[in-house]
Image (cartoon, rainbow, N blue to C red):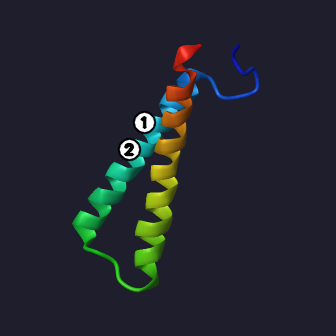
Amino acid sequence: MANKYGPTRGELWFRVAAGIGGLAFLIYAVSAQGMPSGPALFEVIGVGGVFFGGTIALSAWRLWKGRAD
């Protein structure tokens, strides 16, 4: 039975694509500007990487879990 309150499969696929795009842009920005230092390292790599990586992981998990429906 599908969850009527959760995101649709289409929205989950969009989140995966947006997360991959965000990580790709993050990698491009770091390669173009160089590795940040100090607090910017935590902000760019830590927060950005966790946000986009978490978005990909959680959305992919929901897609994988719901494939038996």
Taking 32 as reference, is 36 left or right? right
Packing grade of label 2 (10 A; few <14, some 14-19, many >=20) is few
Disc 1 marks which amino acid?
Ala
Residue at position x 59%, y 13% in the image: 69
Residue type highlighted by circle 2 = Gly
Residue 6 position within the rendered picture, expressed as x and y whole percent measured from the top left = 70, 28
The residue carrying mark 2 is 21
Q: Measured along the vertical axis of the image, is residue 21 above or below residue 61?
A: below
Q: Residue at x 43, y 59 (%)?
A: 49
Label 1 neighbour load within 10 Å: few <14, some 14-19, many 20+:
some
Question: Toward the viewer: 11 or 58?
Answer: 58
Q: For numbered disc 1, what is the local secondary structure?
A: helix
Query: Which residue appears at 54% of the width and 42% of the height?
Result: 58
Q: Is residue 19 left or right of residue 37?
A: right
Q: Which mark is residue 9?
A: none
Query: Is residue 1 toward the left or the right of residue 63 in the image?
Result: right
The CA span between labels 1 and 2 is: 6 Å
Residue 13 vertical placement versus 2 (above, below): below
Picture coordinates of residue 7, whole percent (x, y) = 65, 28
Q: Position of residue 17 (x, y in %)?
A: 42, 36
Give the quarter of the figure containing the N terminus: top right
- Residue at 27% x, 57% y is 28
Residue 30, located in which quarter of the rendered image?
bottom left
Query: In the figure, is residue 26 to the left or right of 55?
Result: left
For the residues bearing labels 1 and 2, Cβ distance under 8 angstroms: yes
Residue furthest to the right in view is 5
> At numbered mark 2, what does the secondary structure look like: helix, strand or loop?
helix
Give the residue furthest to the bottom.
38
What residue sits right under mark 1 in the picture? Answer: 17
Does residue 52 sit above or below 13 in this rendering?
Answer: below
Q: How many callouts does the rendering have?
A: 2
